[in-house]
Image (tube, rainbow, N blue to C red):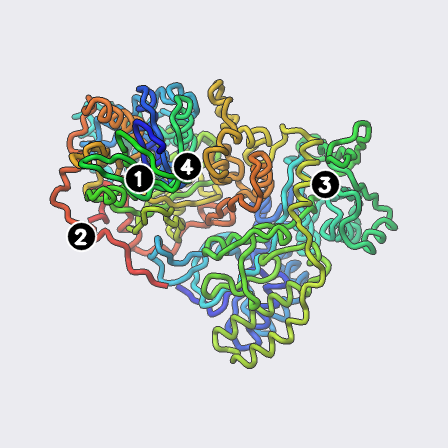
Amino acid sequence: MESRSLVVVGAGIAGTAAAIEAARAGVQVTLFDENPIPESMAALNAPQFFGQRFNAVLHDRALMLERVVHANEGLAEAEEAGVDVQLGTCVWGAFRNSDTSRVLDGPQLGLANRDRSWLIMYDRLIVAAGARDLGLAFAGWNLAGAMGANGAHALMRHYQALASRRMVVLGTGNLGLNTARMALDRGIEVAAIVDVSDSVRGDRALSAALQDMGVRLYTSHTVREAVGRDGEIESVRLVEIDDNSEPVAGTEKEISADTVCLAIGLVPNVELLSLLGCDVGFKPELGGYVPVHDDCMRTSVRDVHVAGDAAGFHDGMVLNTEIARSQGRLAGVAAAESLGAFDTAEATARRRELTGTAINSKPTDAYANWTRWLRALRNAGGSDVPVCPCEEVTREDLIGLRPPRFLKWESERRDGRSLGTLAPDARVNPDQVKRLTRAGMGHCQGRLCREQVALLLAEASGSDIADMPLMSYRPPVRPLPLRVLWSHDESEQVRREWAKWFSPTSPVLE
Amino acid sequence: MDRADIVVIGAGVSGLSSAYFLARAGRDVVVVDKGIVGGEASGRNGGMVSERVDEPLLIPMAVEATEMWATLDEELGHPTEFVQEGRLQVAVTEKDMGDLLAERDVALGHGIDVQLVEPTEIRDLIPGITERTLGGLFFPNGGHANTQLTVQAYAWALQDLGGRLYQNTTVTGLRIVDDRVTSVETTAGDIAADVVVGAAGPQTGLMAQLAGVHVPVAPARVEIMATAHVEPRFPIALVGNGLYGHQAVRGNLIFGGGAHEWIDVDLTTSPGKPNTPLIRNIARRLAELLPGAADAPVVRSWAGVVEQAPDYRPIIDILDYPSNYVVVTASAHGFGISPATGKVVSDLVLFGETNIDISGLGLNRFADYGPDWREKRGWTPAPLRY
Ligand SMILES: Cc1cc2nc3c(=O)[nH]c(=O)nc-3n(C[C@H](O)[C@H](O)[C@H](O)COP(=O)(O)OP(=O)(O)OC[C@H]3O[C@@H](n4cnc5c(N)ncnc54)[C@H](O)[C@@H]3O)c2cc1C
């Protein structure tokens, strides 16, 4: 199996900076990024929440590759520094030996492009996998046109393929404001920016500039529903909310739009770190479960570093890209040092240069904001709204622990059961609820519903969100077709010695 | 001190089914588990239900179980998503075909209704299946169910009868006076009991050890995966090309197979259950078996830890010492046979015997097995490398 000295996952700001830093120190670096992603995956809202708002140009791989390269100034610099840049390649798995799994020759990554998958080994790994959009449900968010800010950002900046004419943005943090500005710059009309809070949460100057450009800001408002025809969003119904997040009668307004962009928060992509067994801790101000790391961006697992949004995201990072960049460089320095490319003195000197760029804005509790949104959306939209659009599980189904509706199960005994009767028996476990209700089991691999499921479960069971265990991540962390995951490199021995289920006739057992 | 007529250790299918049937007979039952209901193999297995003709000694229990499954949802009052449209075993090699014909003879010898199926019929039964099958064996009584819904159904049905379920409660000791277990020591305090049922899955051996009894059971980690929902659907459970699995009612293909890994577990914690790159080999075999589904995206894989006795058969027995301790462990066949397991255990506890033939499943068959049996067998974990 091929082995690389340093693998960096993610060619965003942090990953590119990490790769450059280590390559300049003389390390052999391979930088993987999944963009441009295959259209089939994009259609599943994975890994990005595109909400079917990409245009047909996504078909054109060559053009997409060109645009992705063009959009990332750092890539040319990385290649110049000798980094082996591999685009269109996703990292879908990370494997290492542990107490109960000892078959590997060393830590490995699972990679795939559009056509096939393969494995490589690494000496050092930097995970700079970014963050994904927080999903919060409202009626109609399963229609085409509901998408995430990160998804919109990628479609605008990397792909130039956002198929949207008129957008409503949810969230007045920097994430929302910045999305609105980008959309306006690309000739997309921004019909409204909405927030449940009573004042704009993000940068004052930016919000003033947007208002000067004619964008309406609706604070103390929420979405009642998105309305559409033929599976496409056509308008959005907003309603004002009071101090208790309850809708105020007679304040509904309908805004025509083909896109609703959720820009309420981002969640660090910790899947690969979680597969590797890195310690994660709940930090609501950094977007939930984030890897524990030291000043050099080392995680709790040997040879594994983290950088950028994957290490924790807060709204201040939207307008200040230096945080991610310096984290990337710190990780690159640490990896280079541990590989012997920097001696301690050099590494210390490099680090000293970088520690000046500390976080300048104090992160606030993102979860408090998300909880407020969740309540307002629920109060305005009711409980018959799909929390998990892939599996069509509503808020009511989730809290009632209802068996999937397609089973059409009716019984009085069953109806007596709900989260309320499960909770006293044991700590509420999102994986258990997932397997009972199917929320989070769909093709988006739980990307759209994990956080709101956890929030709803915490609220309904009266538990603290911080005590809610992380719903588990499993490989492949991208939805890969069987023909891609397919082991084309399977050895004769594996083929021959394939075991059937345990039985006396099983060939390999004796 | 807390007390119950019967304390069942382990809220997997074996323990919960036993507890349910005991509660239905009017006994006061407590089930204790260190984790949640179905947190281990019982909630993460392949969901296959079949008459196990590859294991003749299991046939009586398996046949009883398939009959019980037919009405299990009504019995429990909670859905298991059980589908009984049969189980098809297909041959893709000459050797498979030979095994299949041999199994047919065993089945017919035991009065089990099976049919040989031609490749053309196979393609009608399973849309998208490979053209390269040589033939199949169809078991009309086989089927599949949703694993977590099933364990939860047992658990809720038990509670509906007044049974108690202590989750996140770990058994740390067994108190023995004379030749009986008088109480079970747990992290939530001691529970006195007349009878104790040890249904601790991979921890079965360690649990019995607390009473000084040697029960040879080795834990192994196995892997399985699921795709997103795909069309067209087939309701039949399917075995072939080295895989077993089914299409869930929702449409996901759920298939597992391939090498298992012997591991060690400890008494009080939940073993890690990572996947390995083996999932690529499973994906390949599945796409070979069902070329029509080759574009189906795999959305997750998972692993579980199974329990395994030296001869691959369950151990179900009331011990001579301690005389009120029941060992029940399934040797990785436990999900499908679970209704029968509960019935057998409750019969044994209530009457000391059962009319289901369980000969050959007693502990005494391992009288000669010393503590070093795993080493002798080569069933020990590999050394841990980085
Ligand atoms: C991937 C996979 C696929 C499978 N496919 C099938 C299939 O298709 N059909 C089939 O019939 N079988 C299948 N099996 C096997 C089947 O799942 C098991 O045989 C069955 O679940 C065993 O049930 P159990 O209740 O005996 O044990 P378990 O489910 O392991 O339950 C034992 C319980 O005991 C608890 N426990 C252990 N120690 C303690 C302690 N100290 N204190 C308190 N509690 C404790 C554990 O937490 C656990 O919940 C499969 C298994 C796996 C992993």
Question: Quadrant of residue A400 in the image?
Answer: top right
- Where's residue A367, x and y in %? 64, 46
Give the quarter of the image for residue A290.
bottom right
- Disc 1 secondary structure class: loop
- Tell which subunit mark 4 falls on: B
Q: Is residue B273 above or below residue A78?
A: above
Residue A196 position in % (x across, y down): 74, 41
The answer to whether the residues at label 1 and label 3 have Cβ atoms under 8 Å apart is no
What is the three-letter code of the residue carrying label 3?
A: Thr
CA gap between label 4 and label 1 equals 13 Å
Q: Is residue A341 above or below residue A429?
A: below
Can residue A167 be seen in this snapshot?
no
Q: Which mark is residue B372?
A: 2
Which residue shows up at 14% across the image and 38% down it?
B365
From where the camera sits, is residue A356 visible? Answer: yes
Give whichever of B272, A13 is nearer the camera. Answer: B272
Which residue is disc 3 drawn over? A259
Amino acid at circle 1: Ala
Please, what is the three-letter code of the amino acid marked with disc 4?
A: Gln
Report which residue position mark 1 lands on: B200
Identify residue for label 4.
B167
Give, as a three-letter code, the residue at label 2: Asp
